[in-house]
């Protein structure tokens, strides 16, 4: 059995985050425009506009969480057992017996993954150190992340290495992170020089 390592999972998450973020951004923009125009048409004082803005933010956040939960649960419970990011790097999510997970378990796994992130991402890092490469959310939901050929008629086709897609994705996101860090340091430097 080839379990999906930490870095393959990170690469898959990077891809999935971009997809969910782009779709969520478009939906949030549409909702903001529609409700914003509706609020402008109603009129009212600044208190009404402030309350309207809070309602738009609340609705957008709830829809973003629902969209992400539907994306992850739907793809993990599908016949492919993987999100688009996991498919790209060649891994899938299964029950510990190799069976496909249900939509309900997929939704539970999504919210358990939120818990993994809330505890300083320790729940995610656990996947690098546990015997079967399980994060906290996998342990809670009785799931495994394995090579796409695990639990199939051809388990001998499983790949142990990172693979080209994983290396490319990690390289791209690593470069982007480096650019962001350099930009932040430059901004801090500029701000510090203005105050001295």
Image (cartoon, rainbow, N blue to C red):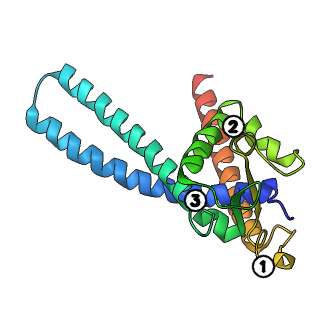
Which is more foreground, mark 3 or mark 2?
A: 3
**Residue ID at (24%, 30%):** 52
In the rendered image, is residue 76 in sight?
Answer: yes
- Disc nearer the start of the sequence (3/2): 3
- Give yes or no for contact between labels 1 and 2 (Cβ–Cβ under 8 Å): no
Characterize the local packing of mark 3: few (<14), some (14-19) or many (20 or more) Cα atoms within 10 angstroms: many
Question: For residue 85, what is the image quadrant?
Answer: bottom right
Q: Is residue 145 left or right of residue 54?
A: right
Which mark sits nearer the N-terminus, 1 or 3?
Answer: 3
* Picture coordinates of residue 47, whole percent (x, y): 21, 19
Residue 154, how many percent across, how many down? Answer: 80, 80
Provide residue 185's location: percent of width, then percent of height: 67, 39
Task: Say which label, 1 or 2, has the lower sequence index.
Answer: 2
Give the CA separation, mark 1 to mark 3.
20 Å
Which disc is residue 25 wearing? none
Q: Which residue is mark 1?
A: 153
Q: Tell me the residue at 59%/48% (across/down).
A: 105
Q: Quadrant of residue 166?
A: bottom right
- The image shows a total of numbered marks equal to 3
Task: Name the residue carrying label 3.
Answer: 77
Q: Secondary structure at mark 1?
A: loop
The answer to whether the residue labelled 1 contacts the one labelled 3, judged by CB atoms less than 8 Å apart, is no
Query: Can you say which quadrant of the picture contains the C terminus?
Result: top right
Residue 174 appears anywhere in the view:
no
Q: Which residue is mark 2?
A: 116
């Amino acid at each position: 059995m080839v379990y999906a390592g930490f870095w393959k999972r990170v690469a898959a998450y990077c891809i999935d985050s971009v997809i969910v973020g782009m779709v969520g951004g478009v939906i949030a923009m549409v909702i903001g425009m529609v409700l914003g125009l509706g609020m402008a048409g109603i009129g009212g004082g600044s208190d009404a506009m402030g309350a309207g803005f809070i309602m738009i933010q609340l609705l957008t956040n709830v829809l973003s969480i629902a969209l992400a939960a539907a994306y992850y649960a739907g793809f993990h419970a599908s016949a492919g057992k993987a999100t688009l990011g996991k498919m790209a790097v060649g891994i899938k999510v299964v029950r510990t017996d190799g069976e496909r997970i249900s939509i309900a378990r997929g939704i539970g796994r999504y919210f358990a993954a939120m818990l993994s992130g809330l505890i300083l991402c320790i729940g995610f890092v656990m996947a690098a150190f546990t015997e079967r490469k399980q994060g906290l959310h996998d342990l809670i939901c009785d799931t495994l992340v394995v090579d796409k050929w695990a639990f199939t008629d051809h388990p001998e086709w499983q790949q142990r290495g990172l693979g080209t897609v994983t290396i490319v994705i990690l390289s791209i996101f690593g470069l982007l992170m480096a650019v962001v860090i350099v930009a932040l340091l430059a901004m801090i430097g500029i701000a510090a020089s203005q105050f001295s």
